[in-house]
């Protein structure tokens, strides 16, 4: 695992030689389902700000746009390639046509919040655009919520990279417990959503 981390850091450091463009390319790769962790690319972007290249806002914006570009690539792959593949071969992976249609309906109905939340979650954020494309989620909504979810993530990690300065590689030590915190927030949000839906359904039944 440590070897893999060092490989990712080496790739990110190479890309950083190109400044904004390097961060843009790195984030494009990450969001196109090539798992170069944004948790490495973005702090490195913050380190570039620390060294005098741009500012936190502009670096976060470039990273967000790079992430969006990669997300569009993954979305289009899912839209044009993944859908026919699943419809034809999904049964071999225990994905029935009925399951696929349910997933489509889910993305059409709940795709916005799914994309937004997923862009704030480690690992999931890298791959969420692919199923969105397969389900043929509305592209405009996909774009809006991808950007809205990506910018806060970029801003936080770029800021941390700038604050850490020359120690940006130690960011993992400063993020211990973050995954659990995000998971807890997500569970609370889901429970809140379910409770609201149940309450509204009960009110409708009472009215009828």
Image (cartoon, helix red, strand yellow):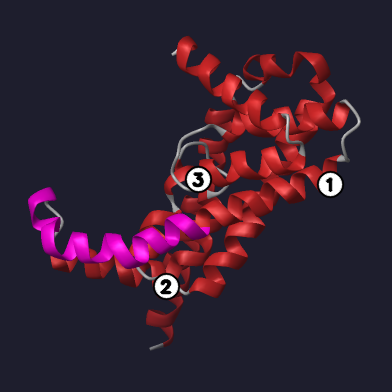
Q: Residue at x 28, y 60 (%)?
A: 82
The relative height of residue 140 versus residue 132 in the rendered view (above or below) is below
Residue at left 75%, top 45%?
A: 60
How far across and down, in percent of the image, does residue 89 sit? Answer: 12, 57
Q: In this view, does 37 lie above or below 190?
A: above
Residue at horizontal 36%, vertical 57%?
A: 131
Magenta region, residue range = 72-93
Q: Mark 2 points at which residue?
A: 109
Q: Quadrant of the N terminus?
A: top left
Determine which residue is flagged by label 1. Answer: 57
**Is 21 positioned to the left or the right of 116 in the image?**
right
Distance from the alpha carbon under mark 3 to that under mark 2:
19 Å
Res 56 quadrant in image: top right
The mark nearer the N terminus, 1 or 2, is 1
C-alpha distance separating marks 1 and 3: 21 Å
The crowd level at tag 3 (other Cα within 10 Å; few <14, some 14-19, many 20+) is many
Q: What element carries label 3?
A: helix
The magenta stretch spans residue 149: no
Left of 118 or right of it: where is 134? left
Q: Are marks 3 and 2 in contact (CB under 8 Å)?
A: no
Could you tell me residue 122's position as x and y percent?
A: 52, 36
Q: Position of residue 81 (x, y in %)?
A: 29, 62
* Marking on residue 125: 3
């Amino acid at each position: 695992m440590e070897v893999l981390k060092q490989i990712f850091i080496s790739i990110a450091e190479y890309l950083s030689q190109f400044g904004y463009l390097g961060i843009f390319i790195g984030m494009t790769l990450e969001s196109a389902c090539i798992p170069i962790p944004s948790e490495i690319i973005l702090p490195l972007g913050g380190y570039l700000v620390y060294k005098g290249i741009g500012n936190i806002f502009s670096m976060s914006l470039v990273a967000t746009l790079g992430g969006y570009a990669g997300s569009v690539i993954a979305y289009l792959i899912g839209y044009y390639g993944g859908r026919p593949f699943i419809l034809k071969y999904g049964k071999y992976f225990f994905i029935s046509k009925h399951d696929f249609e349910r997933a489509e309906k889910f993305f059409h109905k709940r795709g916005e919040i799914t994309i937004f939340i997923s862009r704030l979650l480690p690992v999931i954020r890298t791959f969420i655009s692919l199923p969105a494309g397969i389900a043929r989620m509305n592209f405009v909504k996909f774009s809006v919520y991808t950007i809205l979810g990506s910018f806060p993530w970029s801003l936080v990690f770029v800021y941390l990279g700038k604050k850490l300065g020359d120690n940006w590689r130690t960011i993992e030590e400063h993020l211990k417990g973050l995954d659990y915190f995000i998971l807890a927030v997500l569970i609370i949000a889901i429970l809140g959503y379910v409770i609201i839906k149940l309450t509204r359904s009960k009110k409708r039944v009472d009215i009828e």
